[in-house]
Amino acid sequence: MKTRATRGEGLSPEASAAADAVLREVHRTFTPATVNEFREGTGYNPRQRVATAHRVLLTVVEAFLVGQTLSFASLRAIFVRRFGFVRSCPFQRRFKQESAVAFFRAALAYVVSSVVNAAGLELRGPLAQFSDVRVYDGTGQRVPPRGRDALPACTKGRAGTKWVIGYSIKTGLIEHGTCGAETASETPLWRSLVPQLAAGALYLLDLGFFERQLFEDAQIAGAHVLMRLKSNAKVRVVGQFSDKRHEAIPNWSPSYFLTALPSRRRGTLVDLDVIWGRGREAVELRLVGVFHTSRTVRWYLTTVPRDMLNAEQIVQAYRLRWLVELLFRELKQNTDLGRSFTADAHAVEALTYGAMIAHVLVRSLRIQAALANEIPLEQLRPLACLHVARAFARDIVDALASGSVAWNSVVHRIGDALSIVARELKPSRSRPRIALQLGAIGA
């Protein structure tokens, strides 16, 4: 079975150009010249003997693609098979340095930005009004107990890290991430990762990031935030929107407002105007509630106005936040990334960034296949794409280590496989796709 891209029939010039650009930019990320730029910019691996920066990067990518646990033993075994003998201590030192963290982080930032710019993807449907929909969440990573001084865990005597990772619903790519000890709070980590909100973007966050200043910052930056309402947040209801009419309400609490509702049936929606804070610190927001049962209401606090998303779409949009949990599961199940086999803080970060690079590589192949074969991106299931990439793992790394001709050939073969194996023409009725309804094509 040949795909349209293979035959060259009916492919629009725009899609063809974008597919070629993604293919070219991904390969460029792993060329020795580009890797040397990362190396020189971060001061990584200055001796450049056997375990060069280029070889180390390819080794980590191959380990992720074949589903190997990212331990020094498995990484060294892959390196020896591909590049020849290397002693254990020098090999481990390639990861146990601060410059290694900067090197892998720089490579991640480069491949993400280059693929995003090349692909030219846009949200559709109700979400088309946003420049992007970004989900941030934290996840834990176990570390051997000997690392408890540098990476103290929430459990006494244990060690662990906390990662805050950003995920784009528009592209399906990991945007970036940052790491701290498991005892670190998520909000300061997120603030260091996202010093300024992007105008026009919608941020989906859980209660770990809940604070009034975040909503105020979003309004100033022209961005939007959507998250659940924390029970101790003292918001005051000043208006209700119902049946296309707006009704003023004299500073009621949400719980008191519910006592005046005529219906409490499951699925009933309420759309309110609220004020959080007093005086100059007051922030005007929107509060959407949905009855989960006759006695249980789930509240969603947001800056998104009604002319962009209605109440039902607000509830649906927040459900997209769970896609980052599926991302975490994908990362952890593929290479057991939920635990580290080294207690060195630098090695933990470097290897995790390396796994993110490999994951972005797989998702980039998904984007390239969708563009080259004119397949809607949402029809290529992400997990199935990972399984296909795993089958081609050695071919992918061989091609990355070779020239562009070999890379182009491998990518076209992978695209054919993705269009056959990973494509889902019609979603199952038992698994309603909120992402499809809202136009989140990368989900």
Image (cartoon, grey):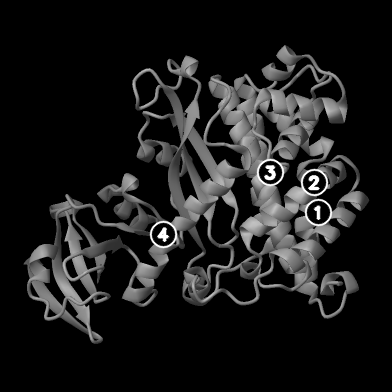
Image mark for residue 24: 1
Q: CA distance from mark 1 to mark 4?
A: 32 Å
Q: State the image quarter where residue 35 is shown.
A: top right
Foreground: disc 1 or disc 4:
1
Q: x%, y% of residue 110? A: 67, 44
Amino acid under disc 3: Ala
Q: x%, y% of residue 232? A: 17, 49
Residue at horizontal 25 percent and vertical 63 percent from the top: 298
Q: CA distance from mark 3 to mark 2?
A: 14 Å
Q: Residue under label 4, please give it.
A: 223
Amino acid under disc 4: Ala
Q: State the image quarter where residue 29 is shown.
A: top right
Mark 1 or mark 4: name the one nearer the start of the chain. Answer: 1
Secondary element under disc 3, as helix, strand or loop, is: helix
Residue at horizontal 78 percent and vertical 45 percent from the top: 393
Residue situated in front as seen by the camera: 310 or 81? 81
Q: CA distance from mark 2 to mark 4?
A: 33 Å
Q: x%, y% of residue 369? A: 75, 64
Foreground: disc 4 or disc 3:
3
Amino acid under disc 1: Arg
Is 256 rendered above or below residue 137?
below
